[in-house]
Image (cartoon, rainbow, N blue to C red):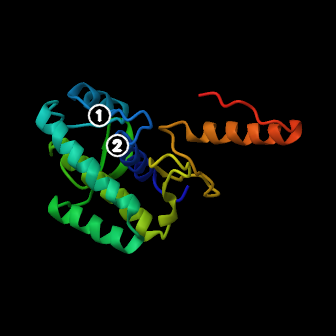
């Protein structure tokens, strides 16, 4: 893998956060404080978590800001990341906690959750930019999906998001197309 473990985790978490609002069913997977609580636990956050509507609104704003990174080119992403880090007065330091060996933080664990998410995501994107691996930050290849992904595969072959089952849908469509070519008749689509 081209990135340290904490960088990978922060990239995956950033993509998961962005994708909470990009589901095919149109539902926001981060619609209420309880959803934020689940996201906090699922992604292994430590430190401050206020668990209120204000924090949820601030995380929604961070989600919007992080989403802009996936539509930016590498140079523009560097500008966006620099702004995020400057606004948070981020100062990188090494830390061990909760079973993780030495890794980088750039804010206190007592900083508001939205600040920690923004800074940890920005720090991870710094590694992507510095290593000239920007192509790993991608939008799902499915025609009807705008979800984002981080391709951490060795051969840079990941094309579909995790959130909308797009890879499976593409494989089923390809299978049906092959079958239709063999049988001479198209199969009925299953919704």
Query: Label 1: how many residues lie within 10 Å, few (<14), some (14-19) or many (20+)?
Result: many
Q: CA distance from mark 1 to mark 2?
A: 8 Å
Task: Identify the mark at residue 17; answer none if there is no mark.
Answer: 2
- Residue lying at 47% horizontally and 69% vertically, measured from the top left: 131
- Residue lying at 75% horizontally and 38% vertically, measured from the top left: 175
Q: Quadrant of the N terminus?
A: bottom right
Q: Answer yes or no: do the residues labelled 1 and 2 have beta carbons within 8 Å?
A: yes
Residue 133 at x, y percent in the picture: 50, 66
Which of the 4 image quarters holds residue 38? top left
Which of the 4 image quarters holds residue 29? top left
Residue 138 horizontal side relative to residue 91, left or right:
right
Which comes before the other along the chain, label 1 or label 2? 2
- Residue lying at 22% horizontally and 62% vertically, measured from the top left: 85
Residue 61 at x, y percent in the picture: 21, 48
Relative depth, front residue between 23 and 151 = 23
Q: Secondary structure at mark 1?
A: loop
Q: Is residue 77 visible?
A: yes
Numbered disc total:
2
Most extreme residue toward the bottom is: 75
Relative depth, front residue between 139 and 79 = 139
Residue 70 horizontal side relative to residue 122, left or right:
right
Q: Is residue 109 visible?
A: no
Residue 69 vertical placement versus 161 (above, below)? below
Task: Identify the mark at residue 42; answer none if there is no mark.
Answer: none
Task: Identify the mark at residue 30; answer none if there is no mark.
Answer: 1
Residue 90 horizontal side relative to residue 124, left or right:
left
Residue 155 at x, y percent in the picture: 65, 57
Relative depth, front residue between 49 and 191 = 191
């Amino acid at each position: 893998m081209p990135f340290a473990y904490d960088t990978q985790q922060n990239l995956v978490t950033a993509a998961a956060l962005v994708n909470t609002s990009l589901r095919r069913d149109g539902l926001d997977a981060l619609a209420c404080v309880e959803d934020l609580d689940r996201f906090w636990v699922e992604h292994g956050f430590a430190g401050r978590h206020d668990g209120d509507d204000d924090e949820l609104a601030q995380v929604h704003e961070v989600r919007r800001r992080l989403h802009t990174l996936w539509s930016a080119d590498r140079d523009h992403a560097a500008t966006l990341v620099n702004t995020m880090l400057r606004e948070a007065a981020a100062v990188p330091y090494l830390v061990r906690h909760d079973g993780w060996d030495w890794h980088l933080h750039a804010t206190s664990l007592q900083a508001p959750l939205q600040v920690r998410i923004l800074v940890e995501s920005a720090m991870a994107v710094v590694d992507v930019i510095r290593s000239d691996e920007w192509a790993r930050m991608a939008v799902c290849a499915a025609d009807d999906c705008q979800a984002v992904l981080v391709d951490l595969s060795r051969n840079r072959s990941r094309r579909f998001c995790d959130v909308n089952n797009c890879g499976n849908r593409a494989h089923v469509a390809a299978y049906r197309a092959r079958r239709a070519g063999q049988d001479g008749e198209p199969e009925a689509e299953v919704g």
